[in-house]
Amino acid sequence: MVALAISWLKDADQALQTSKNQGKPALLDFSAAPQ
Amino acid sequence: MVDFISTHFIPAKIHIKEQPQTFKRFGAQWTPTLLIMAPNGEEAHRIEGFLGVDDMLAQLQLGLGKALFKMEKYAEAEKHFRAVVEKSPKTEAAPQALYWAGVAAYKGTNDPGKLKETAKAEQQKYPDSEWAKKASVWA
């Protein structure tokens, strides 16, 4: 299955907690791009 | 790229204007900065500055391999390291990926021959890279 878009979280701690729970690495993207 | 990120990572985007403290906490001094974090919360890989698609994908897969290595999933890590070398041999990630493929193979088997093979492969493929120099001690 191909994902149509990335479901970005906006909270680093939430990503790290989910990563821990799922045993899957987290990707934190620090950005200044226009939103 | 979208599929690779969605499949292999829990992604979060942090914007400088909204969360400057989070930038500081993770030592993100410039944008773009991407951190690949192992599930135990340790940083596995850091990508700083803009990269084109091929280089970015190679760096993401290298980082995925390094996160799996931290999780002691050596066979899976080696698979991703070797994929970088095979799919993106001309990227800057490739010599490093080849090095870590050798280390992962050694950690998974305790066979020092894996390191020797890696030193030889680095010399053949990337003789001018720092990773060939680092691996040369195994020859």
Image (cartoon, coloured by chain):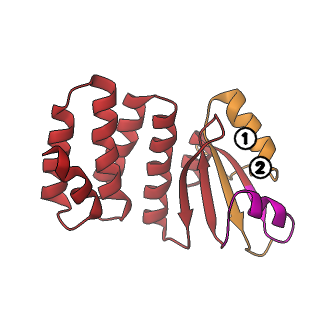
Badge 2 local density, few (<14 within 10 Å), some, or many (20+)?
many
Can residue B88 be seen here? The reply is: no
For the C terminus of chain A, give its image quadrant.
Answer: bottom right
Q: Quadrant of residue B58?
A: bottom left
User: Which contiguous range is marked in magenta?
Assistant: B13-29
Q: Residue A23 at what x, y percent from top left?
A: 63, 29
The amino acid type of the residue labelled 2 equals Ala
- Residue B52 appears in the figure: yes
Q: Is residue B17 magenta?
A: yes
Q: Residue at position x 40%, y 30% from top? A: B74
Left or right position of B15 against B26 = right
- Find residue A12 and name its label: 2
- Any idea which chain is the orange one in this picture? A
Residue B59 as seen in the image, left or right of residue A11: left
Q: Position of residue B85 (x, y in %)?
A: 30, 52
**The numbered mark 2 sits on a residue in which chain?**
A
Residue type pointed to by label 1 = Leu
Could you confirm whether marks 2 and 1 are on the same chain? yes
In the rendered image of this protein, which colour is used for chain B?
red
**Residue pushed farthest right?**
B18
Asked if marks 2 and 1 touch (Cβ < 8 Å), the reply is: yes
C-alpha distance separating marks 2 and 1: 6 Å
In this rendering, position of residue B82 left or right of residue B19: left
Up-down relation of residue B112 to residue B14 (above or below): above
Q: Which residue is mark 1?
A: A16
| Front position in the image: B10 or A5 | B10
Q: Residue at 35% across / 64% down in the picture?
A: B91
Task: Work out which quarter of the rendered image holds the N terminus of chain A and state it.
Answer: top right
**Chain letter belonging to callout 1:** A
Q: A6 and B43: which one is in front?
A: B43
Residue A32, percent from left and from top: 74, 73
Mark 1: give few (<14), some (14-19) or many (20+) Cα within 10 Å. Answer: many
